[in-house]
Structure formats: C-alpha cells, structure tokens
Image (spheres, rainbow, N blue to C red):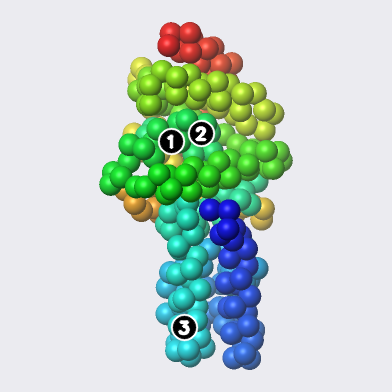
Amino acid sequence: MASEPELSDSLKTFGVVLKALREEAHLTQEEFAPRVRYSPGYVAKIEQGKRFPPGVLPERAALVLGPLAGKVLHVALRSLTRKAGLASWFHEWATIEEEAVSLYAYECRVIPGLLQPEPYIRAIFERRLPPVSDEQIQREVTARLARQELLERRSGTAFSFVLEQCLLERNMGGSEVTRCVIDHLLEVGSRNHVEIQIMPLRNEDHAGHDGQLYLAESPNNQWFGYTEGHRSSYLITDPKDVSVLQQRYGRLRSQALDCRATVSLLEQLRGAL
C-alpha cells in the first residue's frame, strides 16, 4: 500500500536500531559479530540496511546485549516480516537481488518474477491456494512490478534467464495472457544487458532435472545460490554448493536455444495463439 514504508527504509531503520544497541553496549562490530556468530562484514551490511536480518539474530543478540535489546530487535524484525507484498522468506534474496552485478535464473515452474507482465502476475495470484483477498493480490502485484524496476535501474547488471518452453505452452491465464507474456519477453530480451533463452520441449540433454535455480554475483564478486519450495526458500552460500549450481546453469545455457533461435520460437508460438 502507498502509505507503507518501503522495505529498504525499514531495513535501514532496523540497522540503525541494531547499531545503537551495539554501541550502547560499548561493542565494536568486530567484537559483536563473533558473539552472534556472524562476520563483521555481515553485521555491517545489516546495520547499513543492505541485508535482511536473520530470524535468529534477536535471540542471539539478547545473549550479548541483554533481554531488553533482544525484545526491541524482535519487535523490529516482526515489523519487517509484515511488509506487504513480499513473502517473509523471500526478503533476504530480494536484498541480494537488488545489489547483484550478475543475476541468472533457470525456471521450470513459472515465468521468473522479474519477467512477468501484470496480466500473468494476476493470473498466478488469482489461482493460488488458499485464496487471498483482492486487496492482498493488489499489494503483491504492486510489489512484484516494483521489483521489476531492477531491469531498468541496473543496466550494468548482466541478467540471464533460461525458461522451459512448457511455461508458454501451458497457456496460464488463457491465450491473451500468454500473448502478453511472449510480447513482454521479446521486449525485455531485446535489451543489451538481458539474455533470454528457451529450453525446447524435446531435448535429450538437460541439466535442470533437479529443478529451478537462481544465482547472483554481489558487488564484491561473491556468488550466492537460491532455490524455492512451497512457502519456503533456501539461500546457498557455501562456495562448493554454489559451484554446483554454476556448473549446472552453464550447461543449461549451452543446451537451451540461443537468443536468436529463442526469438524465432517466441514469434512462432505467438503466431500459433
């Protein structure tokens, strides 16, 4: 809703509160971080409003800063997770996504959120179970469209998407919605910093049989992986595990249609609607 603060502002507020409580305890970031089992750099990012605070932070901080400080941080964290439009388990990845210098996605379930035109977003949300109110749908549509501003703002970020052809063949929401999706993919894919590839329906070689995956490279060139399940998500930070996803994504790109062939297929699918 328009009257609600942006999540970025709320993250900054949380960071200011954490910093004030830490300084009140006469602790530096270097002293505080190991006591809550995080790195000083990670604590710095939280205090700067650049990272979503982990759910266990208030509990750990209470052991270091005292029970009152823990309660204050717990209340502040709850206000963040109530932010309308974004699932609470998505916030941490959304923060990484905002800063990424490279962002890759392979999807086999739905068109990636960053590529969804509004009619498709509504078609998904209106079919979700359990049902939600029209007001909640509108908040979530607004939040998703706001996320897509990344594609405009981050022209220096390399975006790469590999999408299964079945996502378009499914005809989610009907032919008009599918036509809108295809037109949107053609428009976004024409931008210099965005690469969209379609994985054809029939392909003997396929590295994506374990499901969708996302990869992001931070400004300091650290890579993160991300996967989702039903009402849950998993942020992957271990370099060995991230490397596995990078290998798989590299192979997926080589197995999918190249960008020119993708455009040809999208135009063909559009003409068949």
In the current view of this chain or complex, which residue is farthest to the left? Answer: 130
Q: Nearer the viewer, residue 201 or 181?
A: 181
Residue hosting label 2? 118
Which residue is depicted at the point 40% across and 44% down? 134
Residue 23: quarter of image: bottom right
Between discs 3 and 1, the one toward the N terminus: 3
Task: Judge the density around disc 1: few (<14), some (14-19), many (≥20) Cα neighbours within 10 Å.
Answer: some
Disc 3 or disc 2, which is closer to the eye? Answer: 2
- Image mark for residue 122: 1
Task: Judge the density around disc 3: few (<14), some (14-19), many (≥20) Cα neighbours within 10 Å.
Answer: many
Q: Amino acid at mark 2?
A: Glu
Q: Nearer the viewer, residue 217 or 86?
A: 86
Which residue is depicted at the point 48% across and 68% down? 79
Q: Nearer the viewer, residue 212 or 230?
A: 230
- Mark 3–mark 1 Cα distance, whole angstroms, equals 39 Å
Left/right placement of residue 259 relative to residue 113 reads right
